[in-house]
């Protein structure tokens, strides 16, 4: 679809009433017919993200666990959309075809993959959008291809959209890794959830979506990433992206529809309308209902550490400071946690000398933030399980209790590549950061309760049967005995800053 | 002002200051050495120590030889021991800047009040690896005849260039970015930071030993060689594309090896 300004408009897939998905399927079929040697073939386009085969030009380029995650995938989708559009036109389809996005976070009706991706056949022919390699039905949960519903705690973008800044693992877009920090991944909040979580939930233990080397072979991958890009584009309406030249000016090569190599920098893709001539149906067209001007985060002169140096330069010519990563560690678990598919909990011991500081920092009036750090995450392979992370969760919780104690979700997309990436980049151990000051306030009646221990529970977020499904109630709510490939969490800690 | 305040808040500022001080000490040593002919310092200890920080191991050996009978003879255990602090100074100046992400990692992941202690524990373990290597190289080079050949330096540079292209180098460079568990408190915390220092120092050694061995063979002014080597090691550890950078460093070392060999052969 093209709007009045001549800008391509990406629309929500489950709300579509036209043939957009049909043409997507036909174009995917056409791309699959091409020789895998052609850079515009389905296989080659997927391998640009990741591959298990011998490297060819621009294979294994995907950027994860860093502040390049969002701009690289925006570029990747931009060229892919043009390649698909060219195939649509080749098949005598609409010239204004645009890549749809799957907004699984809208409500429960949107939280299963669109029907067009679930049918093995269309009009007696194999459906190019259907992929068998998705989370299958098990005794614990329904399969993705039978319409399993992703839970709201899996698809939540609340933590990302609440982030005031772009740079940092606790912020929207992720941190630099390297040059400044090289041991832990710097995945930002949007990469963590819903990006990683939806990958794991759709892919399951063995499905393509669970692995960077195969994910882009599943046609739903592109709609998932269009949704991630849509969330970024909406966030950009009233926030500023990273001002650092180290981020803005890094160049990434990709193939254009003519099969030629073309490079772009993040700075060249920040305005989707002006730079790339596309927008989303939820973003007001220019001149229609202008959104609020981008505003920098509130100045917080008394803040300590990173929060004291908001990473917005105002776009001036002056070189922007890297945000200081300084945080005070105020408590940590003594033991590692190993996750194998069932619920696990670990006590985080708050040091006596820090209790008061933690209490102060958790108050609403205090500008500091409190973070739960899930660090040094290691594993051979992504088990495909998404875990909800809960604080001080009572035994046998019901749904409202789970909601009350929910701090965020973690999952492990890309863990098999994190320490040994195939591309020319440094390896790192995975780490996630969840902001929990608000939750501590809610659980403690206005501030951290002052307890010496904070229990952190990791509990699998399973798929739900869709409403009206004959087996809606038949899956056990809290199954035991699941054995997925182990994930080891080296340390859970609490920091203030 | 804001930038200055941010720098002041850096918890690792004192480590950066110590590394800078090590460079100043080495530069001062160079000035002192240039003021003398290098032969009048009386003892093997003084000569070796001063020359190590000014002209590298080749100079150390020359000083040792001059201070004794003029014959070539291995340095004694005592002189090797005396050289250790000088190696620590060199390692502090050269390797600590490349290890700053690790120092910062230890700082940010230790309980707030044991940050400085954790940094010291890490640095002691990290530098111990390099001092041990230095003593080994000093002993090996001063007791091994071919190391005194004028072609020893270009040969070492060529070896360093080749090492850059091997898969072992690549694996070692990756290991430089591998964290190790840091328990929060008690003896386990100390053991954790020391273990991380040893692991990180070993990975750093496996990655950079060849460059450092070549630096050890350089003649005066060693300071320049050391500064260049530090910049190259920092670049390959911190660059976004480490494999490409390591190869470029290898090509540069190969070119320098060729140039030095040519200069030696042409007299």
Image (cartoon, coloured by chain):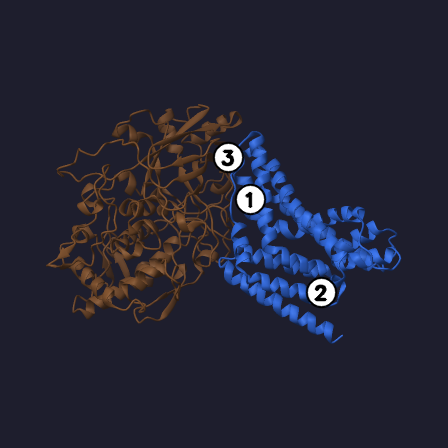
* Residue A376 to residue A332: above or below: below
Q: Name the residue rendered at 60%, 47% in the picture.
A: B201
Q: Chain of mark 2?
A: B
User: Does the image show residue A469?
Assistant: yes
Task: Identify the hue of chain B.
Answer: blue
Foreground tag (1 vs 2): 2
Residue A35 against residue A102 in the figure, above or below: below
- The image quadrant of residue A299 is top left
Q: Dot 3: few (<14), some (14–19), or many (≥20) neighbours within 10 Å?
A: many
Q: Which residue carries the number 3 mark?
A: A329
Distance, label 2 to label 3, CA atoms, is 50 Å
Mark closer to the observer (2, 3): 2
Up-down: is A413 above or below A489? below
Q: Which chain is brown?
A: A
Q: Using the image, name the chain to which the residue with label 1 belongs.
A: B
Nearest the viewer among A64 and B208 is B208
Q: Is residue B214 left or right of residue A444?
A: right
Q: Nearer the viewer, residue B212 or A15?
A: B212
Q: Is residue B226 left or right of residue A387?
A: right
Give the numbered dot on residue B104: 1
Q: Residue B245 appears at what percent x and percent y? A: 53, 62
Of helix, strand and loop, which one carries label 1?
Answer: helix
Q: Residue furthest left?
A: A123
Q: Which residue is mark 2?
A: B152
Percent x, y of residue A472: 16, 36
Q: Residue at x 51, y 58 (%)?
A: B242
């Amino acid at each position: 679809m093209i709007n009045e300004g001549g800008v391509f408009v990406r629309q929500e897939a489950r709300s579509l009433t036209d043939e957009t998905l049909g043409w997507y399927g036909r174009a995917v079929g056409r791309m699959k017919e091409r020789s895998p040697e052609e850079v515009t073939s389905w296989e080659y386009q997927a391998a640009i993200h990741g591959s298990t085969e011998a490297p060819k030009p621009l294979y294994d380029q995907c950027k994860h666990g860093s502040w390049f995650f969002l701009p690289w995938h925006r570029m990747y989708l931009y060229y892919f959309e043009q390649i698909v559009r060219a195939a649509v036109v080749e098949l005598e389809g609409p010239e204004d075809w645009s890549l749809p996005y799957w907004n699984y976070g809208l409500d429960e009706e949107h939280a299963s993959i669109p029907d067009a991706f679930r049918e093995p056949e269309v009009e007696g022919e194999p459906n190019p959008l259907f992929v068998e390699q998705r989370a299958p039905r098990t005794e614990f949960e329904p399969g993705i291809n039978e319409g399993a519903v992703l839970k709201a705690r899996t698809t939540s973008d609340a933590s990302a959209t609440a982030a005031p800044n772009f740079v940092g693992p606790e912020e929207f877009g992720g941190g630099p890794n390297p040059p400044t920090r090289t041991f832990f991944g710097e995945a930002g909040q949007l990469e963590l959830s819903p990006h990683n979580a939806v990958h794991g939930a759709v892919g399951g233990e063995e499905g393509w979506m669970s692995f960077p080397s195969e994910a882009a072979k599943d046609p739903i991958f592109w709609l998932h990433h269009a949704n991630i890009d849509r969330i970024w584009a909406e966030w950009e309406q009233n926030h500023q992206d990273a001002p650092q030249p180290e981020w803005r000016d890094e160049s990434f090569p990709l193939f254009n529809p003519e099969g030629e190599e073309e490079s772009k920098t993040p700075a060249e893709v920040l305005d989707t309308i002006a730079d790339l001539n596309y927008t989303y149906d939820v973003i007001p067209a220019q001149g229609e209902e202008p959104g609020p001007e981008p505003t920098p985060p509130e100045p917080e002169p008394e803040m300590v550490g990173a929060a004291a140096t908001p990473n917005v330069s105002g776009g001036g010519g002056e070189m922007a400071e890297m945000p200081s990563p300084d945080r005070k560690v105020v408590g940590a678990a003594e033991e590692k946690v190993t996750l194998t598919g069932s619920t696990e909990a670990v006590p985080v011991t708050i040091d006596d000398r820090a209790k008061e500081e933690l209490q102060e920092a958790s108050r609403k009036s205090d500008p500091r933030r409190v973070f739960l750090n899930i660090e040094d995450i290691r594993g051979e392979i992504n088990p495909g399980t998404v875990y909800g992370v809960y604080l001080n969760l009572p035994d046998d919780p019901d749904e409202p209790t789970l909601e009350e104690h929910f701090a965020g979700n973690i999952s492990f997309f890309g863990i098999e590549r994190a320490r040994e990436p195939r591309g020319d980049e440094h390896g790192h151990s995975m780490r996630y950061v969840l902001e929990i000051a608000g939750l501590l306030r809610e659980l403690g009646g206005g501030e951290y309760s002052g307890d010496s221990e904070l229990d952190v529970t990791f509990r699998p977020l399973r798929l739900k049967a869709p409403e009206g499904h004959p087996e809606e109630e038949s899956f056990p709510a809290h199954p035991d005995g699941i054995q997925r490939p182990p994930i080891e969490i080296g340390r859970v800690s609490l920091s203030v800053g | 002002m804001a930038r200055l305040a941010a720098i002041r808040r850096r918890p690792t500022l004192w480590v950066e200051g110590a590394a800078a001080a090590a460079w100043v000490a080495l530069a001062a040593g160079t000035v002192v050495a240039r003021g003398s002919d290098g032969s009048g310092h009386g003892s093997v200890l003084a000569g070796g120590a001063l020359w190590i920080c000014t002209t590298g191991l080749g100079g150390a050996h020359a000083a040792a030889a001059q201070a004794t009978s003029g014959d070539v003879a291995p340095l004694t255990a005592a002189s090797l021991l005396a050289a250790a602090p000088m190696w620590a100074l060199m390692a502090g100046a050269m390797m600590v800047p490349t290890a700053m992400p690790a120092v910062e990692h230890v700082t940010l992941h230790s309980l707030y009040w044991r940050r400085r202690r954790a940094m010291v524990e890490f640095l002691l373990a990290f530098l111990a690896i390099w001092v041990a290597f230095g003593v080994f190289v000093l002993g090996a080079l001063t007791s091994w005849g071919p190391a005194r050949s004028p072609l020893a330096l270009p040969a070492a540079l060529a070896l360093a260039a080749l090492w850059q292209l091997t898969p072992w180098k690549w694996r070692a460079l990756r290991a430089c970015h591998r964290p190790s568990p840091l328990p929060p408190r008690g003896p386990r915390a100390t053991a954790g930071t020391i273990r991380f220092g040893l692991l990180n120092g070993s990975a750093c050694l496996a990655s950079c030993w060849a460059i450092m061995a070549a630096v050890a063979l350089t003649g005066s002014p060693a300071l320049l060689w050391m500064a260049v080597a530090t910049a190259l090691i920092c670049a390959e550890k911190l660059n976004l594309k480490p494999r490409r950078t390591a190869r470029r460093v290898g090509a540069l070392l190969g070119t320098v090896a060729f140039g030095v060999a040519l200069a030696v052969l042409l007299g």
